[in-house]
Image (cartoon, grey):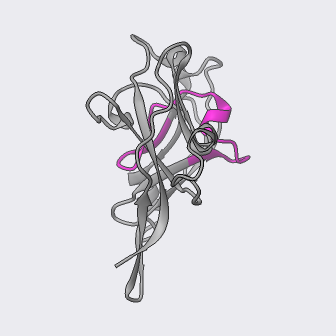
Amino acid sequence: QLDTPSITGDKETLSSLRRENPGKICPNPTNIEAVTLSGHSVEETGEKIFKYDTKSGFVCRNRDQRDWKCQDYKVRFSCSFCLGFSVFAVCWTRWYNRDHPTGSGDWEHLSALRKENPGGDLCADFVYVEAVTVKDKTPALKTGQKFHFPGKGFVCRNEDQRFSNCSDYKVRFGYYCLGY
């Protein structure tokens, strides 16, 4: 955690965090996770987040919130790392698309996917979720749409979108595995 909420919001930018913690954040993070200081996920807070990616970091703007106030967040970055001759990497499941953006949005929950795909590759301890559009495989972070990562899953709510409904997304889950 670097910043506490101010008049404009809560900013945990990668560049500022690197300045405050020299050598402690890897050069190319593979994932970012943000939670409130009390441990609540972004989904649980219901706040709209302006930036939430491995290039910029995390920015919650007060002006985007219904009550004009962001909670205090902390972030962490994940990276692949080496240990001796072994490399711990991220392995991925196949892509899943269980829902379409009709009704309230596109809901790709891990618990629902496990129920619908028993005996599949959804049994590992997942540390990442990746979402892309079904139509052209655009990463969710680049669509300009608002979405949430509630625990283990992906949610795009139509009510959070400014100009249109959610795109149709598919997801896959990543877990640490031993690479060579």
Nearer to the camera, 32 or 165: 165
Which residue occupies the extreme front position in the image?
Answer: 119
Q: Is residue 56 magenta?
A: yes
**Which part of the image, by quadrant, shows the C terminus?**
bottom left
Counting from the top left corner in percent of width and height, residue 117 is at 56, 43
Number of numbered callouts drawn: 0
Q: Position of residue 92 (x, y in %)?
A: 42, 56
Query: Is 83 rendered above or below residue 72?
Result: below
In the image, 49 versus 132, the foreground residue is 132
Identity of the residue furthest to the bottom in this view: 84
| Residue 149 in the figure: left or right of residue 36 | left
Residue at the location (56% across, 26% down)? 62
Q: Decide if residue 54 is on the left or right side of residue 37.
A: left
Which residue is drawn at the image coordinates 41% and 49% (left, top)? 94
| Part of the protein shown in magenta | 34-59
Q: Quick check: 173 above or below 11?
A: below
Instruction: Name the residue nearer the viewer: 10 or 133.
Output: 133
Q: Is residue 86 visible?
A: yes
Q: Is residue 52 visible?
A: no
118 up-or-down from 178: above or below = above
Q: Position of residue 128 (x, y in %)?
A: 49, 52
Give x and y (percent) for residue 90. Answer: 42, 63
Question: Relative to 1, is 54 on the left or the right?
Answer: left
Does the magenta run of residues contain 149?
A: no
Residue found at the very far left of the displayed protein: 136
